[in-house]
Image (spheres, rainbow, N blue to C red):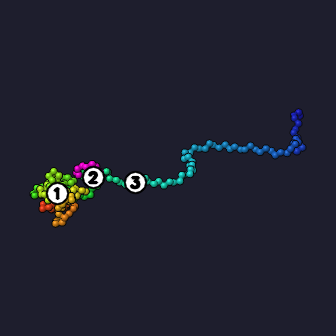
Amino acid sequence: MGGPPPLPRGPASMPPQAHHAPPPPPPPQQHHMPPPQQHHMPPPQQHHMAPPQQHHMPPPQQPHMPPPPQPHMGAQHMMQQQSLSAPVPQQSAYLGALTAIYQGERTSVNKEKFIIGRGRQTSDLTIKDPNVSRQHAMVEFQNGVYYMVDLGSTNGVEYQGQRVTRKAIAEGDVFRICDHDVLFTYR
């Protein structure tokens, strides 16, 4: 029988130890996890502090200013410009529609300032009478309305027996300048 001698069993057979130390802890277990599946997820939201809201005031509005007056131009041209740029109130007449009738003769009122007087070169309707001023009265076209205006004459302008300094002209109005009647019509 010739093999190695049997190993002894039991406490007496253990080698003597100098210190009794606890056994070392087992190494941490590493679990083998499959790689995470990639899902298409939105990036995590970042929480930022929003700046305090500021109240935005609209810029102050400039008041609507009409265009500056143009150098003197014909009233018809001005009316055309007004009708293109802004609504125009309903007008009772338009330049050129009024006719003055004096001693049976018709004269078209075709200016913004139509002068009536005795001065042949300074008036549009001439009345030959020394009591009529050179520039006695004016028919003025303003804001779509014709007016009879006394130009500070000595003897004045009368309408229905009353002296007037300014009066809107209606269809068929008759104005007396000294002893002369001037009829106005829109027909």
- The image quadrant where one finds the C terminus is bottom left
Image disc number at residue 133: 1
SS for dot 1: loop
In percent of width and height, residue 167 lies at: 21, 62
Q: Residue at x 90, y 43 (%)?
A: 12
In percent of width and height, residue 103 lies at: 10, 58
Q: Which residue is mark 3?
A: 61
Q: Residue at x 79, y 44 (%)?
A: 24
Measured Cα–Cα span from mark 3 to mark 2? 24 Å
Q: Residue at x 87, y 38 (%)?
A: 6
Q: Nearer the viewer, residue 91 or 152?
A: 152
Give whichever of discs 2 and 1 has the lower sequence position: 2
Mark 2 Cα shell of 10 Å, populated few (<14), some (14-19), many (≥20): few
Q: Would you identify the image quadrant in which residue 185 lies?
A: bottom left
Q: Nearer the viewer, residue 118 or 183?
A: 118
Q: Give the amino acid type for the residue marked by disc 1 in the picture.
A: Ser
Which stretch appears magenta? 69-76
Q: Would you place residue 125 above or below residue 1 in this image?
A: below
Q: Give the amino acid type for the residue marked by disc 3 in the picture.
A: Gln
Measured Cα–Cα span from mark 1 to mark 3? 51 Å
* In the image: residue 167, left or right of residue 180: right
Give whichever of discs 1 and 3 has the lower sequence position: 3
Viewer-nearest of labels 2 and 1? 1
In percent of width and height, residue 84 lies at: 27, 51
Measured Cα–Cα span from mark 2 to mark 1? 35 Å
Q: Which residue is mark 2?
A: 82
Give whichever of discs 3 and 2 has the lower sequence position: 3
Is the residue under label 1 in contact with that under label 2 (CB below 8 Å)? Answer: no
SS for dot 3: loop
